[in-house]
Amino acid sequence: MKTIGFLELNSIAKGIEVADAMIKAAECELVFAKSGCPGKYCVLITGDVGAVKSSIEVGENVGESFVVDKLIIPSVHPQVIKTINMANECAELNAIGVLEYFSITASIVGADTAAKASNVSLLDIRLGTGIGGKSYVVLTGDVSAVTEAIEAGARKSIESGMLINKVVIPNPRPEIFDALI
């Protein structure tokens, strides 16, 4: 399993500078560096734990007061990176669970926690673009697995106040899956 590092900044210009400094600082792969709503810039990297920690530290130093949030997840669940890149395939659709957050960072943590908590498939991790800076995670599995995953993903962010809402839909109509995929 890989380690991911993520920085969320409130300046696009500073975010671009930070992304460059981060990938120059250590042997990390840039998963993405892009702007989002409302005027944020996000940088996601992956690599070995030490390299990711070094890159995040450099990013924080260069980003200074423009850093909104950060995270490092050692041994991130493999579905997280695939789903962020819209490359995760889901074989079976069943119940749907949705976690909605105020923070992009909270969404990544919630997705990783949910995927590790139960036997579910991540369908989408929407990272703040076009939705006012909010983010959300959509997952599927049997009802009990989805419920367990949603509760785990929510628990992590309730303490920080970043959770907006959570739902489990036991038997959604097929049109809902079509709209999500």
Image: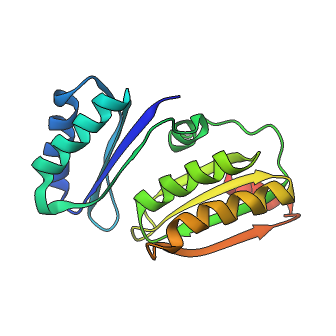
In the visual, does 12 lie left or right of 72? left
Image location (x, y in percent) of residue 123: 66, 48
**Residue 51 vertical position relative to residue 109 in the rendered view, above or below:** above
Image location (x, y in percent) of residue 46: 39, 32
- Residue at 46%, 61% (x, y): give it: 106
- Residue at 45%, 77% (x, y): give it: 161
Residue in the foreground of this view, choosing between 41 and 5: 5
Residue in the foreground of this view, choosing between 143 and 51: 51
In the visual, does 43 lie left or right of 98? left
Quarter occupied by residue 164 = bottom right
In the visual, does 12 lie left or right of 134? left
**Residue 131 vertical position relative to residue 32 in the rendered view, above or below:** below
In the visual, does 54 lie left or right of 75? left
Image location (x, y in percent) of residue 134: 45, 68
Quarter occupied by residue 133 = bottom left
- Residue at 85%, 59% (x, y): give it: 144
Residue in the foreground of this view, choosing between 53 and 128: 53
Residue in the foreground of this view, choosing between 92 and 143: 143
User: Looking at the image, which residue sits at the far top?
Assistant: 27
The figure's colour scheme reads rainbow
Asked whether residue 18 is in view, the answer is: yes
